[in-house]
Image: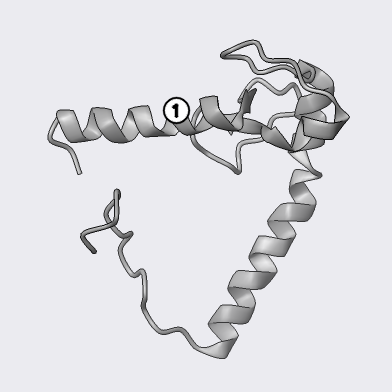
């Protein structure tokens, strides 16, 4: 772990893989993208163009600043009813993730 990293590396990170293994990883990622059927668009339709945390409203010209946060942290958990999503502006989304990193640090967890 470098001095600049805020999180420990996952096991196996940086491990050399064969071309076949790399191709399989890319195939699975692309497959996952197609299965997700763009959950961001679905979340924007369901929850509106507003940050669930700070209440900032967005328009087309700044909509790129509104992101989808997975409440359980699992990006593969994309129920059609949107129950695992909340739309957060980039600032609130960053705050949400940094809170868990800070909590882990203060609790002595890695």
Residue at image coords 74%, 38% = 64
Residue 83 lies, in percent from the top left, at: 65, 20
Residue 30 lies, with reference to residue 96, above or below; the image says below
Residue 75 lies, in percent from the top left, at: 58, 42
Residue 35 lies, in percent from the top left, at: 76, 49
For the rendered model, the colour scheme is one colour
Label 1: few (<14), some or many (≥20) within 10 Å?
Answer: few
Q: Using residue 13 as the reference point, say whether residue 22 is left or right of it.
A: right
Residue 1 lies, in percent from the top left, at: 23, 63
Residue 11 lies, with reference to residue 61, above or below; the image says below
Q: Using residue 53 as the reference point, say whether residue 46 is left or right of it.
A: right
Residue 97 lies, with reference to residue 52, above or below; the image says below
Residue farthest to the front?
61
Q: Nearer the viewer, residue 70 or 20?
A: 70
User: Which quarter of the figure is the C terminus placed in?
Assistant: top left
Q: Nearer the viewer, residue 88 or 78?
A: 88
Residue at image coords 17%, 38% = 109
Q: Quadrant of residue 68?
A: top right
- Label tally: 1
Question: Does dot 1 land on a helix, a strand or a loop?
Answer: helix
Instruction: Give the residue pinned by disc 1.
Output: 95
């Amino acid at each position: 772990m470098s001095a600049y990293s805020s999180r420990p590396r996952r096991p196996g990170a940086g491990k050399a893989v064969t071309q076949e293994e790399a191709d399989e990883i890319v195939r699975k990622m692309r497959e996952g993208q197609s299965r997700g059927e763009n959950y961001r668009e679905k979340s924007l339709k369901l929850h509106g163009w507003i940050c669930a945390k700070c209440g900032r409203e967005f328009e087309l010209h700044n909509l790129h600043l509104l992101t989808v946060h997975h409440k359980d942290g699992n990006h593969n958990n994309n129920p059609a009813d949107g129950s695992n999503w909340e739309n957060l502006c980039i600032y609130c989304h960053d705050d949400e993730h940094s809170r868990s990193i800070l909590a882990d640090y203060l609790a002595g967890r890695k």
